[in-house]
Amino acid sequence: MNEEERFLFDLRGYLVLPQVLDAETVRQMNAWIDAQAERDPQWRGQTANKHIENPITWHPLFQNLMDHPRVLPILREILGERFRLDHDYAIFLEPGHKGLKLHGPHTVPFDPCHYYRCDNGQIRCGLTVVSWSLTDVPPGAGGFAVVAGSHKSNFPCPPDIKALQRPSPIVEQIPCKAGDCVIFTEALLHGTLPWKGPGTRRTLFYKYAPCMLAWSQQTYRAPEQVPFPPHFWENLTPRQKLLLAPASAIDFHPPIEA
């Protein structure tokens, strides 16, 4: 991170990186999803919220997001040089989706999985999210929202604000363009506002943790939990294989090189 990015991440608990993916890459990703929806009725469905696991297994376009060169150095800085991909999924919201109440902050009481610290100028996070926008999220359209700075809160959020039962100026929608990336700590109070956009909101979530920490029960190395397509492991780079390693003590997990 540069000096401004570091200041903003510490201040707010999140960081927006504009146009990390170029327009052609976003187009190819959306075209792949459209084609998959034509083939698989489960991808169409009738619900306003489609939650689909493990986009890293879909296509190399999605696989290569796990160690994207714009994002990886930031993850090394806030998680330490030994970290792992804990789990990943996609959420597709249709117009009319009612949203998801705010969850977190995980500071009161202390949560050993979701935490944020800064000691002697060094940021350290627990579970940390990289979200990739494949569609535009204009101001006022709903979608991802946060209470900026709540990752350092010492008191719980009022329940009616947390449940989105009354409007509050502290709940801030985060507009994005297709190709933008948002990095945020899970210690931050965040959720989803009702989706009012003109079409489907497509977002990919890749969630990372320090190497000794596991939030998800899934293990990428267990084929009965994550049904990888043929040749998936063969096509991974050594760094990507290391990112998919199970949780272990620092002594047993080599550094992730940026």
Image (cartoon, grey):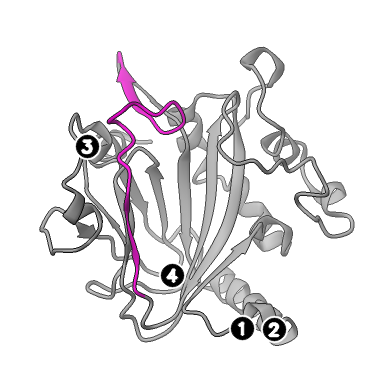
Q: Is mark 1 on a helix, strand or loop?
A: loop
Up/down of 93 relative to 211, above or below: below
Up/down of 96 relative to 76, above or below: below
Residue 30 is labelled as none
Between tags 1 and 4, which lies in front?
1
Residue 44 is labelled as 1
Left or right: residue 191 versus residue 83 is left
State the residue in front, 248 or 177: 248
Between tags 3 and 2, which lies in front?
2
Labels 2 & 1 near each other (Cβ < 8 A): yes
For the residues labelled 1 and 4, the Cα–Cα distance comes to 21 Å
Between tags 1 and 3, which lies in front?
1
Q: Name the residue under label 2.
A: 41
Q: Which amino acid does label 4 sit on?
A: Ala
Q: Mark 4 points at which residue?
A: 178
Q: Which amino acid does label 2 sit on?
A: Pro
Q: What stretch is highlighted in magenta?
A: 98-120
Residue at horizontal 73%, vertical 64%? 59
Residue at horizontal 67%, vertical 12%? 251
State the residue in front, 161 or 16: 161
Tag 2: Cα neighbours inside 10 Å, few (<14), some, or many (≥20)?
A: few
Which corner quadrant holds the N terminus? top left
For the residues labelled 4 and 2, the Cα–Cα distance comes to 25 Å
Indicate whether residue 186 is drawn in magenta.
Answer: no
Q: Mark 3 points at which residue?
A: 11
